[in-house]
Image (spheres, rainbow, N blue to C red):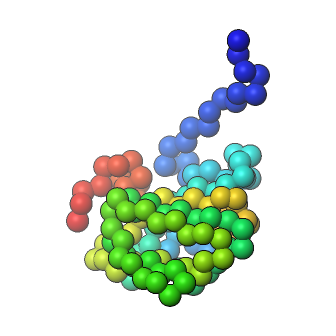
Amino acid sequence: MTDSRCMIPIAKSPQEYQAYRISPNSSNKLAIAFDPFKDKVSFTCCVEIFDVGGKTPPNRHMYATEMFFVLKGEGRATCDGKTILIQEGDSLLVPPTGIHAIENTGKSRLYTLTIMVPNEEFAELIRSGVPAELDEEDLAVLRGKAANA
């Protein structure tokens, strides 16, 4: 018996991701993989790309949990005054109300898979920013073909 609630999966390649900088002077860009606008889901999933020395401003979410998985690079994560170093393969879970920031401390870009559940207007914030391009380095990392620098 087939479950009538099953939907056809959504598949995207990195070339289909839409990237934005939240503001023109942001030191990171976010490439949206899935969000409530395009995909009718309750979360936002993106790849966050931090320039060398780039960082997020300290921020918090009242209801959402945010997860970061480091795809490439190294950095520093701070949450509620506690700081840890992060590198490729590490994951970080920030609970609701945690004041947090991520900073690229490496010599190359830092890439994180970032998921926020529920969306809590994260996709709206990203999409209200400045459109940005993914370059060959970004696309190589997203395809899993980047050389470790």
Quadrant of the drawing holding the C terminus: bottom left
The vertical placement of 60 against 113, above or below, is below
Q: Tell me if 50 is positioned left or right of 34 in this view.
A: left
* Residue 129 visible in rendering: no
From the top left corner, tell me how far across and down residue 13 is, in percent.
Answer: 50, 43
From the top left corner, tell me how far across and down residue 126 is, in percent.
Answer: 65, 67
Residue at 31%, 49% in the rendered image = 145
Residue at 70%, 27% in the rendered image = 6
The vertical placement of 125 against 17, above or below, is below
**How many numbered marks are there?**
0
Q: Tell me if 85 is positioned left or right of 2 in this view.
A: left
From the top left corner, tell me how far across and down residue 138 is, in percent.
Answer: 41, 59
**Front-most of residues 125 and 140:** 125
In the image as oriented, which residue stretches furthest toward the bottom? 81
Residue at 66%, 76% in the rendered image = 97
In the image as oriented, which residue stretches furthest toward the right? 4
**Front-most of residues 127 and 56:** 56
Quadrant of the drawing holding the N terminus: top right
From the top left corner, tell me how far across and down residue 59 is, in percent.
Answer: 61, 81
* Residue 96 visible in rendering: yes
